Amino acid sequence: MRIACPHCGPRGLDEFLYTQDASVTRPKDGGAAPTPEWTDYVYLRENARGPRREYWYHSAGCHAWLVLTRDVSTHEILSVELP
Amino acid sequence: MCITLIASQEFFAPMRYSAFSVITQALRGHTGWKPAWRKAEPAPHYDVVIIGGGGGGLATAYYLARHHNVGRIAVLEKGWLGNGSIGRNTTIIRSNYGLPGNIPFYELSMKLWEGLEQDINYNAMVSQRGIFNIYHNDAQRDSYARRGNAMRLHGMEAELLDRAQLRKEFAYLDYENARFPIQGALVQRRAGTARHDAVAWGYARAADKLGVDIIENCEVTGIDIENGIVKGVQTTRGAITAGKVGIAVAGASSLVGAMAGLRLPIESHALQAFVSEGLKPLLDNVITFGAGHFYISQSDKGGLVFGGDIDGYNSYAARGNLPTVEDVCEGGIALMPMIGRARLLRSWGGIMDMTMDGSPIIDKTPVGNLFFNGGWCYGGFKATPASGFCFAHLLAREEPHPVAAAYRLDRFAEGKLIDEKGAGAQPNLH
């Protein structure tokens, strides 16, 4: 896998750090009590085959956060965007 | 006359493997061996359908048929037996865990391993060669001491070796490594390895003998649910109705779970494993590197079998990428420089069910009569016997086996996580 960083161009995978799923949205603060929305956001995932949006960090490069759309069945990177 | 009598097929039916049967077959030119299990055709109905013919599914079917009276049982496998993680792991068995929810479960598994071959009449090459978890600094020593003490409090043996004691066992480790000097190791001598394929084949054969239908090339494409209760499954070989359905498809749990509307605390990740060219006997035990993530043993064929971290990003492709290969090999060479000249013969990848706390799930689901076994992260092989034993108990009695009672599906919502590594809800870090 090589990732085309919008700032640095195509770079090897070892310059990047995968962080997390970009398809989940942080719910509004609901106070101290646990809510189903928070459980869903923190723990539950769709985990489907095919294209997936995810956050990557260019840790050994320009330090940009990137949003990749990547096919998890083939590792093909469909798009790289700035968040 | 005598030879004729003992060589007759009737004398053996059903065939039991023994030194006697090997000698008799040798005299007959090995013409009398039978397939280890039948090629079963799907029946229209079963009392229990288990989705997934891997280690977990086959062990579940065996223990269900052996210990519980549940009627007709089928195991549905998408491909052929042993093509998933049961046939592509690094074969380590151990029970050196540190948390109360885990220790009794993995210890039950270890005890089942110790009696497995006699129980299922199959040579699974269980070898209790011992596992040495090496530590490199004071904090790690304290952490390993705590883990060892937790094991001893649960009635298991564990030893903490210092550097001098470890040197007596392994002269060849890189003790004076400038960055990661070796200080000692936590040892579980009952741990070891087992022949992974033989575990699948042995359970399949033993389950088949007890009447379980093992149906290969039968992919489940849908789960039929009426009024919140499971009624059966749709497969590539037709519809099958079922009293109860158990899912045991780690690696693809979310995909099969979605057929029943389940949204699970699981992500699928790729893990790579490696085998070197065959070498003369070199490594008697299982050794793990504490300063990185690297574990190694030597197979009976002579290949060094080793692995490390998962690749770190979600994947359903059963292959990994080169940075992880490099990282694993660096760990190995930092630990034992002598393997630097060995050539890598092959590497492969498998798909792991990584949960949000690094521990598995064996539980009922919100759908009636639908049960779930999965989330084995990259530690499922050692758990195979207990995973099947406890899932069979759950399927038959509809209540968890006492040693697996913590592996609940709702522990995430309840905050009762079993996070052995303390990494938090980041599946790629467990």
Image (spheres, grey):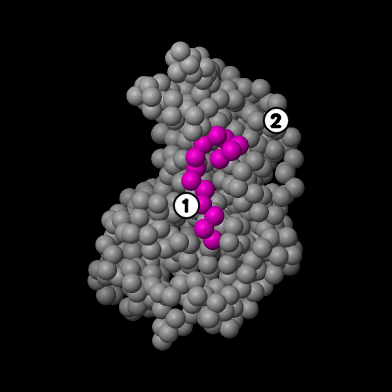
Q: Which residue corresponds to mark 2?
A: B68
Mark 2 and mark 1 lie on one chain; the one further toward the N terminus is: 2
Q: Could you say which quadrant of the image residue B307 lies in?
A: bottom left
The answer to whether B112 appears left or right of B282 in the picture is: right
Q: Residue at x 58, y 42 (%)?
A: B116
What type of secondary structure mainly makes up the magenta span? loop
Q: Residue at x 38, y 27 (%)?
A: B26
Describe the element under mark 1 as helix, strand or loop.
loop
Q: Which residue corresponds to mark 1?
A: B91
Which residue appears farthest toward the left when viewing the image? Answer: A9
Residue closer to the observer: B266 or B353:
B353
Please name the amino acid that badge 1 sits on. Thr
- Residue B265 higher or lower than B216, as above or below: below
Q: Horizontal and vertical percent for residue B408?
A: 68, 50
Extent of the magenta region: B117-130
Q: From this viewpoint, is residue B19 visible?
A: yes
Residue closer to the observer: B242 or B230:
B242
Q: Horizontal and vertical percent for residue B33?
A: 41, 24
- The numbered mark 1 sits on a residue in which chain? B
Q: Are marks 2 and 1 in contact (CB under 8 Å)?
A: no
Please name the amino acid that badge 2 sits on. His
